[in-house]
């Protein structure tokens, strides 16, 4: 029985991460194809970049990487919590349509403009990329949360009440099962968006981090470093998706199967 359950979990996990690995392989394939078209000083081939990894991964690089991960996780956690609260409030107050329209407007604000505004407000440092992640991640995750709650089956709530259930039981048996897939979606979407935003935030408003290193490499036209940092970002995204799916498969598999 345990063996069959483990096999089922493994299949579910593989199914969930298959798209992520496919996307990563497509990225490598496109990169390789472009490297055959353009000269090495513009687009170096993947092997050329990977072979330089031992020289690029040093104590200084790890310091910048740790700062980027700290900012990314801090910004994402704050954005996730605020977005969840906003989504639930919008649903409970039955103003989700108005809230979604307002939040959608914030989604069209270019990240560069936000970076400049936050740079003027906070100055150079951690606050710019963290604030950017929060500002750009909240709308999509809040809308996702509100939309997920709107899909709750009202009849299920009535059934719980008919059998003498209380509001906590309605939350446990109706709302939480509806929110688990939404939370997984928010984690996947939010971390992916946060990775893109953190690079832009560090690129404009920091003197350290992967985005800062990327800007330096651009200025010096060190394309091997540019693609190395791009590869690192893609690997971080892939690792995050693997960890997130592993957690949800292990703890909440009955809600996402």
Image: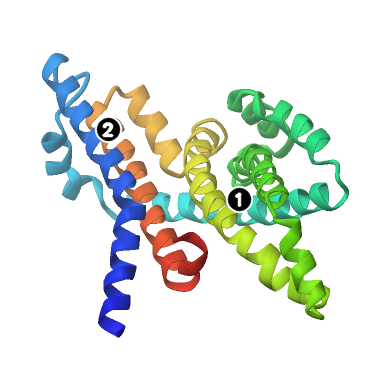
Q: Is residue 95 above or below residue 221?
A: below
- Residue 211's disc number: none
Which residue ends up furthest to the bottom in the rendered image? 1
Query: Do the CB atoms of the residues marked 1 and 2 lie less than 8 Å apart?
Result: no
Q: Is residue 158 above or below residue 89?
A: below
Image x and y of residue 221, in percent: 29, 22
Pick the front one: 238 or 214: 238
Count all numbered tags in the image, as a single digit. 2
Q: What is the spatial separation of the Cα atoms under label 1 and label 2, in whole angstroms?
A: 25 Å
- Residue name at image x 67 percent, y 37 percent: 123
Q: Quadrant of the N terminus?
A: bottom left
Image x and y of residue 192, in percent: 47, 43
The answer to whether 81 appears left or right of 197 in the picture is: right
The residue at which mark 1 appears reads as 75
Mark 1 or 2, nearer chain start:
1
Image x and y of residue 45, in percent: 14, 29
- Give the colour scheme shown: rainbow
Q: Is residue 214 above or below residue 61?
A: above
Q: How many neighbours does mark 2 have within 10 angstroms: few (below 14), some (14-19), or many (20 or more)?
A: many
The answer to whether 255 appears left or right of 154 in the picture is: left
Q: Quadrant of the C terminus?
A: bottom left
Image quarter of residue 31:
top left
The residue at which mark 2 appears reads as 227
């Amino acid at each position: 029985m345990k063996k069959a359950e483990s096999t089922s979990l493994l299949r579910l996990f593989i199914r969930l991460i298959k798209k992520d690995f496919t996307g990563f392989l497509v990225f490598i394939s496109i990169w390789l194809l472009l490297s055959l078209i353009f000269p090495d000083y513009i687009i170096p081939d993947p092997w050329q970049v990977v072979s330089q990894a031992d020289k690029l991964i040093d104590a200084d690089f790890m310091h910048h990487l740790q700062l980027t991960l700290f900012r990314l996780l801090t910004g994402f956690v704050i954005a996730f919590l605020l977005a969840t609260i906003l989504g639930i409030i919008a649903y409970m107050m039955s103003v989700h349509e108005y809230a979604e329209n307002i939040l959608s407007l914030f989604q069209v604000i270019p990240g560069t403009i936000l970076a400049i505004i936050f740079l003027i407000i906070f100055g150079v440092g951690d606050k710019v990329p963290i604030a950017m992640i929060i500002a750009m991640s909240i709308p999509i995750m809040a809308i996702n949360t509100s939309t997920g709650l709107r899909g709750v089956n009202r009849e299920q709530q009535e059934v719980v009440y008919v059998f003498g259930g209380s509001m906590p039981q309605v939350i446990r048996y109706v709302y939480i099962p509806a929110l688990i897939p939404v939370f997984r979606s928010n984690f996947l979407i939010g971390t992916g968006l946060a990775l893109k935003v953190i690079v832009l935030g560090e690129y404009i408003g920091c003197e350290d981090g992967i985005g800062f290193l990327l800007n330096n490499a651009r200025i010096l036209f060190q394309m091997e470093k540019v693609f190395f940092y791009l590869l690192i970002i893609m690997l971080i995204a892939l690792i995050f998706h693997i960890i997130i799916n592993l957690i949800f498969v292990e703890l909440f598999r009955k809600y996402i199967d």
